[in-house]
């Protein structure tokens, strides 16, 4: 009888550890996806630990395979638009500053 109880206890503990391991693996995947999205310019890099945890929690509620596939399909080729029909490649922070202060004077 004691051996059966030990086996049940060991089995329950193994199931609990397996579930916790899957949770940690999913959290690690979600964290990687957040930084991949930031790398591709879809979202900003989390600036605080709390912000990172909120974004991870948000992704944990989603199917990460679908999110990964969406990132793979778009592959960083998403266009967020350009200013005044031109290319955004030649717009520097200095140009934006000069333009902003020239409107005031």
Image (cartoon, rainbow, N blue to C red):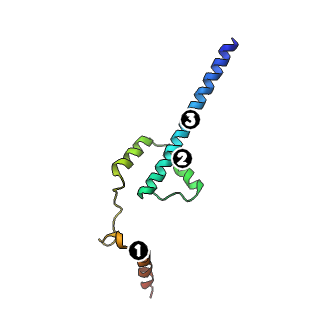
Instruction: Give the labeled residue for mark 1.
Output: 92
**Residue lying at 59% horizontally and 54% vertically, measured from the top left:** 50
Q: Is residue 55 above or below residue 44?
A: above
**Quadrant of the image occupied by residue 2:** top right
**Residue farthest along the top direction in this orientation:** 1
Q: Position of residue 22 (x, y in %)?
A: 53, 35
**Residue lying at 55% horizontally and 53% vertically, measured from the top left:** 52
In the image, 18: left or right of 44?
A: right
**Residue farthest along the bottom direction in this orientation:** 105
Precedes in sequence: disc 2 or disc 1 = 2
How far apart are the alpha carbons under marks 2 and 1? 35 Å
**Residue 57: which disc?**
2
Precedes in sequence: disc 1 or disc 3 = 3
Q: Position of residue 94 (x, y in %)?
A: 44, 78
In the image, 98: left or right of 24?
A: left
**Are discs 1 and 3 less than 8 Å apart at CB?**
no
Instruction: Give the labeled residue for mark 3.
Output: 21
Local secondary structure at mark 2: helix
Q: Position of residue 18 (x, y in %)?
A: 56, 31
Local secondary structure at mark 3: helix
Judged by depth in the image, the label closer to the viewer, 2 or 3, is 3
Q: Position of residue 70 (x, y in %)?
A: 37, 47
Local secondary structure at mark 1: loop
**Residue lying at 36% horizontally and 62% vertically, measured from the top left:** 80
Q: Can residue 42 be seen in the rendering of this structure?
A: no
How many marks the image carries: the answer is 3
Q: Is residue 64 above or below residue 41?
A: above
Around disc 2, counting alpha carbons within 10 Å, would you say few (fewer than 14), some (14 to 19), or many (20 or more)?
some
Judged by depth in the image, the label closer to the viewer, 2 or 1, is 1
């Amino acid at each position: 009888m004691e051996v059966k109880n030990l086996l049940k206890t060991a089995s329950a503990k193994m199931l609990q550890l397996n579930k916790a391991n899957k949770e940690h693996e999913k959290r690690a995947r979600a964290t990687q996806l957040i930084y991949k999205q930031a790398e591709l310019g879809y979202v900003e890099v989390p600036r605080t630990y709390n912000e990172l945890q909120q974004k991870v929690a948000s992704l944990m509620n989603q199917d990460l395979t679908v999110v990964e596939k969406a990132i793979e399909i778009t592959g960083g080729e998403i266009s967020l638009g350009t200013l005044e029909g031109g290319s955004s490649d030649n717009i520097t922070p200095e140009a934006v500053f000069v333009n902003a202060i020239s409107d005031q004077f």
